[in-house]
Image (cartoon, coloured by chain):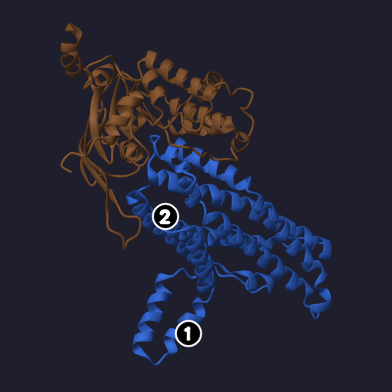
Amino acid sequence: MHRIIAIVENTFKESLRQRILLLLIVFSVLLIVISLFLEPFALGEAPKIMRDFGLAAASLFGVLTVIILGSALIHRDVEKRTIYTVLSKPVKRSEVLLGKFLGLSALIALLELGMFLIHQLVIFAYEGAFAPSLFIALPFTIIEVMVLLGVLLLFSSFSSTTLTSIMGVIFFVVGHAMPDLKLFADQTRFATLKVIAHGFYYILPNLENFNLRIDLAYGIGLHADQIVFALCYGVIYIVFLLYLTKIIFDRREFK
Amino acid sequence: MLYKSLIPYIFSAMQLAIELRDVDRSFKNHFWQRKKQVLRNISLEIYEDEVFGFLGPNGAGKTTTIKILTGLIRPDSGDVSIFAHPPNSLDAKRKIGFLPESPYFYEHLTGREFLKLHALLHDLKHYRKRVDYLLDRVGLVEAAGFQLRQYSRGMLQRIGIAQALIGSPDLLILDEPLTGLDPMGRKEIKDLILEEKQKGTTIFFSSHILPDAEAVCDRIAIIIEGEIREVGDLSALLKKGTKTDEISLEQWFVKQVEKPRQGS
């Protein structure tokens, strides 16, 4: 356990000290603050637009951060040979993998919390009251980022940083197009396409399960079973991705 | 003369720190290329408490052998053990300290944070004392709070040695520890190796800087094109095949490299 905590701490610090992170934070904070000035374009729906825009900005921050930092997480260590000294210590490869996953997840979770708090301040500045119900979206935003990080670690365990980043973007886009894919799978008349589309629908991560923005921004009630399903789906998917990555990482050679 | 005839018996009574038996390894850079044999039938026995120099020209297979010893890659065939454990087992890794060739470390960590990380990977409970001791020993107390990206090449090599020593290893594996260092840096690293030798640590180190190897090694092996050409006591090897006085390691090494390969 000490070994995993050491790697979590190291990954957290290393990622926090990347200069690109500062740029991402500034960009996202600006995006959240800009929602204060959207009123002229909001056609009387300013509070709802502000909520939706802020949550989307916080989510985008998490996704950009995880793709930029997560895709290089293992590859950078291999490229710079820092992994050699770590793996020569009495530590299992699965512990290194888990430590890196949890370290970056913890950092992004903390920064996401910061983004949500800034969003609350922006809402308070406009409305004179906080909107604490929006915090329900926080764990789901973090889980979505963790699922994407699982995908990135899986690809980075056997491919380059560039390919891993591209796969991260593809999984993010496809993951949010899952309802459309399901609709296509149900309605297409071609049997082979139907099977393939259904296959992709059940195998690829459905990130729309974690998207509560519209429901929260427009005050649509959330059902407990929807929340429980999304949580369970996220946890199972993350465990599945990490297990798959472990199998590949255990067999990997560092030539 | 008597002690030389006793050497085989002395070694047979000592415990083996490293054993490689008939190890082969080949690579291909791209899937369309043919495999290139990098190691051919490598067999070596390194005993406890000895300083063993693993010498060879660039591309001879030194780093590949070291990666097999540290569990970073696996041999295609043959057996490898570290203190009778498989090299990728936690039991073997607890006994090893490893410094890779031209090491790059987590550049945003400070020297102290870097050593703390490696101490915790060894499950050291009282790591602060050990970190302080090693920072002092490698002369980096003043630089302990600086990030590693601010370190010079020599400082990185010294912090690298410190991380290798953090778990008080029984076996130090050093891949080209003296390459790229200025004379002072080389002296400092050599002194550290000799101090560890006096403490009874087994040291396996690769190098192509021969005078340095000559200064610290008990025994050496020469690897050329993936084959072990010679293994043995350094002074005996240097006298072998010469009717006159002992030649320098450099002269002897050049002779070995120029020798045609067996069977060719």
Pick whichever, A251 or B42, lies toward us.
B42
**Which secondary structure, mark 2?**
loop
In the image, what residue occupies the spot 58% across and 40% down?
B107
Q: Name the residue under label 1.
A: A183
- Tell me the chain of label 1: A
Q: Are marks 2 and 1 on the same chain?
A: yes
Tell me if label 2 and label 1 are in contact, CB under 8 Å: no
Mark 1: give few (<14), some (14-19) or many (20+) Cα within 10 Å. few
Residue B263: % across, % down: 15, 42
Q: Quadrant of residue B135?
A: top right
Residue A241: % across, % down: 41, 59
Query: Chain A: what color?
Result: blue
The amino acid type, in three-letter code, at marker 2 is Ser
Q: Is A14 displayed left or right of B236 in the figure?
A: right
Going from the N terminus, do you reach mark 2 or mark 1 first? 2
Q: In which quarter of the image is residue A11?
A: top right
Question: Which circle, 2 or 1, is nearer the viewer?
Answer: 2
Mark 2: give few (<14), some (14-19) or many (20+) Cα within 10 Å. many
Q: In which quarter of the image is the N terminus of chain A?
A: top left
Q: Mark 2 points at which residue?
A: A157
- Tell me the chain of label 2: A
Pick whichever, B116 or B147, lies toward us.
B147
In the picture, one chain is brown; tell me its letter.
Answer: B
Residue closest to the far front = B244
How many marks can you see?
2
Residue B5: % across, % down: 15, 12
Pick whichever, B102 or B198, lies toward us.
B102
